[in-house]
Structures are given as structure tokens and as C-alpha cells.
């Protein structure tokens, strides 16, 4: 499951969006100020497959969102370093206020999305800089006790990180690969995590920009930030999303259509969070269950089998695969077999987005 952690300054709409995305109006799991909720990834393909098989269960892919009341002032992001849910998050979602409301004063005195986006980025960078400096001090002490080739390599990559951080660059902008990525994995640097910016628009701006992120960025002064921060973005209006969440499905669809939107902003946030790390879905289908399984792009079949159960991965024999388009086009698995569209693939086969798979395995 993809884990995403929400960050944002007070009065940005972060907690409201968390509640809307996770249906956590009556509270969510977690300890203390930490709240955890689950969002279902919208996927029309799963709806089509469910309609074909009419299973007892329909199970979509999910994203776990975490919300915490920190970073309310300068230095606040430092508190995230010691919160396990944030250290272990796969991605950060920064809710940036772009709406104007005199009844909800901005803690900095004025609404300035570009300022807030950069301020939070600076907080993450400073928090990581402290972690890097402490680790370098420890490495230098250990190297004085005796030479270690691995420690020297770790020192070099951490120094590279410190240099970037001192220059004000988030670690997600570095081009690290292979063993260097593994050496940093244990530090869980915050600025190294993929970042999704959620631009919380003013109600009056929605009809103008809709779901167009570039127009939203231009209107809110965030174009420059997005161009250099290696960051994704989604634009929505939390106030309107709250209204939509209280409507019947048909009325909600009509409301969105009036605004020129194909889907809700909340669905776009969930989908963008899912896509941010290059995640995709394959499906298992049948009369008992139709389910979407989350994997990273480039995952081989045997590892994908492990998402279902480790025993299936261990006893993997072959993957029986048919493309989503072939199955829905033919109307049944039997018709796909007749036309030679069901393939047997080995453990090294790279699973494709939308594959419908039945794993053959030894028991």
C-alpha cells in the first residue's frame, strides 16, 4: 500500500481534505495528534470488471494518508523527523492555501501560496540538514577508529546531500542511483520524498482554472516553484469538495459538470498520489472477488505474485495473463483463449498496467 503524509501550515485546509479523502469525519486511527485514514483509488477499469463478473467483493487499490498537527511555525517541520508515519511515508502531500476568506485569517497575515510552498520546502531542507550533519559527525568518529570502505562511501553520499541542502536544494532533485540510494534509505530524508502540491483554490477561481494545474500555478504564483522543486501538483477547492461530498452521486456528477470537471478534486489527489511514485494496478478477477493490486512499474511477475501472498511468490510456476482491453473487448476469458490472447509468462515477465493475471503456483 502506498503511504502518503499530509503537511501544511495552519488554515490551509489540510485537515479538512484529510477528512474528505478518508471519510474520517468521525475520527481515524493513529496515536495522539497522528491520524491515519484509507482512501480508495478510483479506477474505472475495476468498475467494468466488476460489472462483467458480478463478484461477491470489489476491492480497489488504496492509499494510506496520515495527518498530524505540526509545522505550525518556523522550525515545525523538525518535529516530523521523529514521527514514524512521516519518516516511513512514500510521499508527502503539501496542502497550500490559495483561497481568500476573511473569517479564516492566514497565520502569516496574507495569502501567498508561493511563499508558503517555499517556506515548507525550507523547513524540510533544514530538518534534513540536521540529520545529515549528525550522521557525518558519527561517521567521522567511526573512521578515526579504523578505515572502512563502506563508511567512506556513505560519507561521500551524505556529504553530497549536505552540499545540496546547504544550497537550498531538496534531496529529491539529486540524481542518485543504485547503492547510493540504498545507503540513504535508512535516513528517511523528508526532502528526498516525492512531493505533491495540492493548491487549495478560492471558490471563485475554480470555474476559471478547473483541473488545469498550469493555469492554477500561474494564477497563484507557483509556476517558478513547481519548475525547480521536482514536484507534482493538483488544483482543487476544499470548500466546493465539501459541498460535493454531501450530495447524491448523480447530483455530484452534475455539479462537477457545471464546473467543467470530469471528476472530483479529491479523486485527482488520490490518483496523483498513487501515480507520483510510478505505481500502477494489475487485477485478479472471478466470481468471488475482483481486486486491484498496487505495484511499482517495472515489477516482475514473481514479485507481483507476492503482493497477493508470499506462498504464491515462493511457489510461482507461471502467470496466466490477458490484457484489460482484450478481456473487456472479447467479453470473457474463454473468448480470449479462443483468440490466443491469454499468455503464459515466466517469473521475469514485467507486469503491465491493467494486466489481468491468474498465478499458477505450487502448493
Image: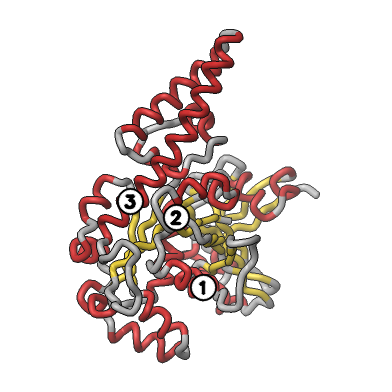
Measuring 44% from the left and 64% from the top, which residue is drawn there? 271
Disc 2/disc 3 C-alpha distance (Å): 10 Å
Residue under label 1, please give it.
Answer: 19
Give the mark, 1 or 3, whose residue is nearer the N terminus. Answer: 1
Give the mark, 2 or 1, whose residue is nearer the N terminus. Answer: 1
Callout count: 3
Coloring basis for residues:
secondary structure
Disc 1/disc 3 C-alpha distance (Å): 25 Å
Q: Report whether residue 176 is seen.
A: yes
- Which image quadrant: the N terminus? bottom right
Q: Nearer the viewer, mark 2 or mark 1?
A: 2
SS of the residue at dot 1? helix
* Image-based side of 173 in relation to 177, left or right: left
Disc 2/disc 1 C-alpha distance (Å): 19 Å
Tell me, for residue 334, which label it has, or none: none
SS of the residue at dot 2? loop
Q: Report whether residue 328 is seen.
A: no
Residue under label 3, please give it.
Answer: 119
Give the mark, 2 or 3, whose residue is nearer the N terminus. Answer: 2
Measuring 57% from the left and 74% from the top, which residue is drawn there? 24
Residue nearest the observer in this picture, 31 or 326: 31
Tell me, for residue 71, which label it has, or none: 2
Amino acid at each position: 500500500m502506498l503511504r502518503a503524509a499530509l503537511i501544511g501550515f495552519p488554515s490551509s485546509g489540510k485537515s479538512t481534505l484529510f477528512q474528505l479523502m478518508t471519510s474520517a469525519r468521525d475520527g481515524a486511527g493513529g496515536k495522539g495528534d497522528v491520524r491515519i485514514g484509507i482512501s480508495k483509488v478510483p479506477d474505472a477499469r475495476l468498475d467494468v470488471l466488476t460489472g462483467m463478473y458480478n463478484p461477491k467483493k470489489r476491492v480497489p487499490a488504496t492509499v494510506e494518508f496520515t495527518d498530524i498537527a505540526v509545522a505550525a511555525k518556523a522550525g515545525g517541520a523538525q518535529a516530523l523527523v521523529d514521527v514514524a508515519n512521516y519518516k516511513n511515508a512514500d510521499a508527502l502531500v503539501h496542502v497550500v492555501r490559495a483561497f481568500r476568506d476573511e473569517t479564516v485569517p492566514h497565520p502569516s497575515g496574507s495569502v501567498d501560496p508561493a511563499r508558503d510552498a517555499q517556506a515548507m520546502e525550507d523547513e524540510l531542507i533544514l530538518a534534513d540538514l540536521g540529520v545529515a550533519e549528525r550522521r557525518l559527525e558519527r561517521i567521522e568518529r567511526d573512521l578515526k577508529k579504523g578505515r572502512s570502505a563502506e563508511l567512506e562511501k556513505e560519507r561521500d553520499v551524505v556529504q553530497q546531500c549536505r552540499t545540496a541542502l546547504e544550497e537550498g536544494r531538496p534531496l529529491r532533485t539529486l540524481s542518485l542511483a543504485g547503492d547510493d540510494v540504498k545507503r540513504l534509505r535508512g535516513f528517511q530524508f523528508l526532502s528526498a520524498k516525492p512531493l505533491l502540491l495540492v493548491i487549495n483554490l478560492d471558490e471563485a477561481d475554480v470555474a476559471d482554472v478547473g483541473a488545469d494545474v498550469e493555469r492554477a500555478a500561474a494564477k497563484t504564483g507557483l509556476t517558478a516553484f513547481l519548475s525547480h522543486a521536482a514536484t507534482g501538483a493538483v488544483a482543487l477547492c476544499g470548500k466546493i469538495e465539501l459541498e460535493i461530498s454531501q450530495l447524491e452521486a448523480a447530483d455530484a456528477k452534475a455539479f462537477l459538470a457545471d464546473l467543467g470537471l470530469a471528476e472530483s478534486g479529491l479523486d485527482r489527489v488520490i490518483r496523483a498520489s498513487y501515480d507520483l511514485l510510478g505505481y500502477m494496478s494489475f487485477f485478479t478477477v472471478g466470481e468471488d472477488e475482483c481486486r486491484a493490486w498496487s505495484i511499482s512499474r517495472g515489477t516482475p511477475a514473481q514479485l507481483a505474485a507476492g503482493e497477493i501472498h508470499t506462498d504464491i511468490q515462493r511457489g510461482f510456476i507461471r502467470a496466466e495473463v490477458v490484457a484489460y482491453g482484450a478481456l473487456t473487448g472479447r467479453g470473457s476469458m474463454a473468448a480470449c483463449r479462443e483468440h490466443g490472447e491469454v499468455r503464459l509468462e515466466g517469473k521475469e515477465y514485467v507486469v503491465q498496467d491493467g494486466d489481468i493475471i491468474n498465478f499458477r503456483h505450487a502448493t
